[in-house]
Image (cartoon, rainbow, N blue to C red):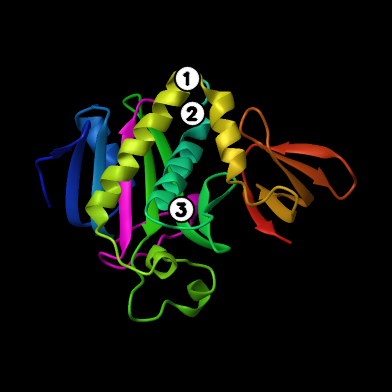
Amino acid sequence: MDERPMMRGNWRVYHHATIDSTNLEALRLARREALPWTAVVADTQTEGRGRMGRTWLDRRRHCLLMTALIYPPPGVEGLLGAAMALSAVRVLEEVGARDPAIKWPNDVMLGGRKLAGILVEGPVARLMAVGIGLNVNAPLDPLPRDLAHRAAFLSDEIGRELELLPLADALLARFEREHFRLMSGELAEMLEDLRGYDCLSGREIRARSGERVIEGRAVGWTDDGRLAIIDSDGNKIALDAGEVTLS
């Protein structure tokens, strides 16, 4: 474990070979130091977590595993995950990925399969932990059968492997810009950018929020970051949170 952070741009970055979870470590740092612009990067996790209580599986040095600690933008804390997703698709385009997309609220998709998941937790000591797991370099050994048809790897798309730390630097720099936009009140501009990468709008979906299940057609991101749906009875519904699958 590296105890001393490295300065990479404006970020203090802690790098670990193995850790339980970059989000958990970031929250521990928040309690201990309460310093924003801190990031935790790991080669592998033993207790990686995703949204909805799921486990995030990774392969050592094949996935970018990172959590950023930042102050929440007042009133739009719920868009921090979307800001990280938007940062990711912009970086993906820069390295040659074609048509990366965002599935509301913050999954990053490539070729119809999931490339990255994002988990936001906090606040702790007034800081939010925004974690991302991004599949970068495809492993030689096959994935478990239940993941093989759902997971994408960046190297398969662009035809080459990438170094993870430079990719992390690029993602942090981009996320810094998106965070600044939220802090500056540029919500409308960000939402327009998110709509440009939306892969759900106009498609038939099934959404689960708690015990509620909604089937209908996705309309797109609302002006406050929710998902607009026209249900099977023709009612327009705005979903605050939940899990969405294509019908």
| Residue that badge 1 annotates | 74
- Whether residue 25 is visible, yes or no, is no
Is 42 left or right of 2, judged from the image as shown? Answer: right
Residue range of the region highlighted in magenta in the rendering: 45-73
Between the C-alphas of marks 1 and 3, the distance is 24 Å
Looking at the image, residue 19 sits to the left or right of residue 23; the answer is left
Q: From the viewer's perspective, is residue 55 above or below residue 83? A: below
User: Label 3: which residue?
Assistant: 117
Is the residue marked by circle 3 packed among few (<14), some (14-19), or many (20+) residues within 10 Å? Answer: many
| Disc 3 element | strand
Tell me if residue 75 can be seen: yes
Q: Which residue is mark 2?
A: 77
Compute the Cα span from label 2 to label 1.
6 Å
Residue 209 percent location from the top left of the image = 66, 46
Which numbered disc flags the more N-terminal residue, 1 or 3?
1
The local secondary structure at tag 2 comes to helix
Q: Nearer the viewer, residue 44 or 150?
A: 150
Label 3, label 2: how far apart the Cα atoms are? 18 Å
The three-letter amino acid code for the residue at tag 2 is Glu
Q: Which of the 4 quarters of the picture holds residue 62?
A: bottom left
Query: Residue at the spot x=57%, y=44% of the render?
Result: 105
**Mark number displayed over residue 213:** none
Taking the image as shown, residue 180 lies to the left or right of residue 173, namely right
Q: Quadrant of the C terminus?
A: bottom right
Kindly give the residue lying farthest to the right in the view shown: 233
> Is residue 51 a member of the stretch shown in magenta?
yes
Check contact, mark 2 vs mark 1: CB within 8 A: yes
Q: Residue at x 18, y 49 (%)?
A: 15
Please report the residue visible at 52 percent of the width from the left and 46 percent of the height from the top: 106
Q: How many marks?
A: 3
Q: Amino acid at mark 3?
A: Gly
